[in-house]
Image (cartoon, rainbow, N blue to C red):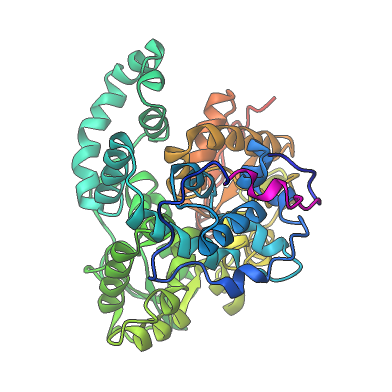
Amino acid sequence: MQTSENSTPTPEQQPSSFSQLPLTNGFDADNPPDPTLIDACVHCGFCLATCPSYRVIGKEMDSPRGRIYLMDAINEGDAPLADATVQHFDSCLGCYACVTTCPSGVQYDRLIEATRPQINRNIERSLPQRLLRNLIFSLFPYPNRLRVLMRPVTLYQTTGLQRLIRSLGWLPKISPQLAAMESLMPPLSPKAFQDTLPERIPAEGKTRYRVGMLLGCVQRLFNPEVNDATARVLTANGCEIIIPKTQGCCGALSHHQGEEDQARDFARQLIDAFEGTEVDAVLVNASGCGHTLKDYGHLLKNDPAYAEKAAAFSAKVKDVQEFLANVGLTASLSPLQEAPLTMVYQDACHMLHGQKISLQPRQLLRQIPGVSLREPIDAALCCGSAGVYNILQPEVAEELGQQKVANLINTGASVIASANIGCFVQISKHLEKQGRVVPVLHPMQLLDMSIRGEQLPTDEWSGE
């Protein structure tokens, strides 16, 4: 079913997707989508133009409005929670652009967050899907486990075997999901295989703040230089850093895919790791992690032992760019190249729509002498990464990644600044596929270079 962007499906259209489905099961009693939140939707259709899955798939049921209809129908017993309906919930990236767009203030984020655990509890997925999801959630949130796997992967990348496998083209035919996972693996640096940052890093000069720092899981391996740069920027601006060695995954990947028990376990462990550190703020340099950390109060609201602690912890969480823009930079900055530098900042969804952070990163980057920021079209549209969405839903993610990179390249910028590890991996993949060589750097890496007086190579940009 496809409708115009601002149209409301007719009563005849709404149930037509459901009427032929057997009503065998529905949501269970454990936190189903709240009917009050569902009723807040006035079906205006403003969400359709900003929904990436609707933009690609073009079907009403793969839009926020359509999914809300589905939730309501399942609540009312007019549709089952079954494979035919679950596919429309699975197509959601969880980017929350619709939350930003909605003039009625519909809390679609809470609705989809309530729906995904229902699916995990009540739907028996196919064996290949179960195996893939078990692999993801038993591996990605555990850096040490991931490191064990990445050692043979490094050999796979460096011996020429990767080029051979890709040239044969059989992996996408066997499993598009595994092919997507393989295509997203960046080359690993030696720093990926151990954590080198100490538990305490003193501030340079006068100590202005004492801050905690989250290392992340995937970022530790796939782009460890970001954590090093973040630490140097913070200490150069008067921050003493505390990095508890007992910290683990924040639970973002699990939370975004409805693995709530695992997400809550990770949340409790992380709260315990930072307990007693007496930090002024807990700083995060990956937007997906930051969004989940700020939501701990909601995630653990029914846990009598952690509800209060979770709310207090979340109140201290800040994105590192949000924090530095607020407290101000004290370190002097130098140009990143002799000529003026054109740069484009890529808005990560969980930064822009989840945390409502947009101006702060741009304010920081503009303080680097000689930097000129350009804005891409469709800046608020998801790149297709969305946690592990680009593995689970590779076809939609592929089209979104191509669009995002084309829009970034069309700005003519020499550098892409991106503040989320998932976006970094997705954009880097599609730059390579399009034959473009453009550095993709975290804003903390750019600030670090500017503070240390390093310059970008002038021949990095080969986008022409």
Q: 423 or 102, which is in the foreground?
A: 102
Q: Is residue 85 above or below residue 293?
A: above
Task: Identify the residue at image location x=39%, y=32%.
Answer: 177
Residue 297 position (above or below residue 18) = below
Q: Residue at x 44, y 43 (%)?
A: 83
Residue at (76, 43) in percent of width and height: 3
Span shown in magenta: 7-18
Residue at the (25%, 72%) spot, across then down: 269
> Viewed as shown, does residue 421 lie left or right of 50?
left
**Left of 82 or right of it: where is 215?**
left
Q: Tally the numbered discs.
A: 0
- x, y percent for residue 216: 36, 59
Quarter holding residue 108: bottom right
Residue 458: % across, % down: 62, 35
What secondary structure do most residues of the magenta stretch adopt?
loop
The picture places residue 17, in percent across and down from the top left corner, at: 60, 43
The answer to whether one can see residue 177 in this image is yes
**Residue 193 screen position, x and y as percent:** 24, 46
Residue placed most toward the observer, 280 or 126? 126
Foreground residue among 342 and 248: 248
Above/below status of 266 relative to 446:
below
The reply to whether residue 229 is in sight is no
* Quadrant position of the C terminus in the picture: top right
Quarter occupied by the N terminus: top right
Q: Quadrant of residue 76?
A: bottom right
Question: Looking at the picture, does residue 200 appear above or below residue 228?
Answer: below
Name the side, left or right, on which 429 lies relative to 37. left
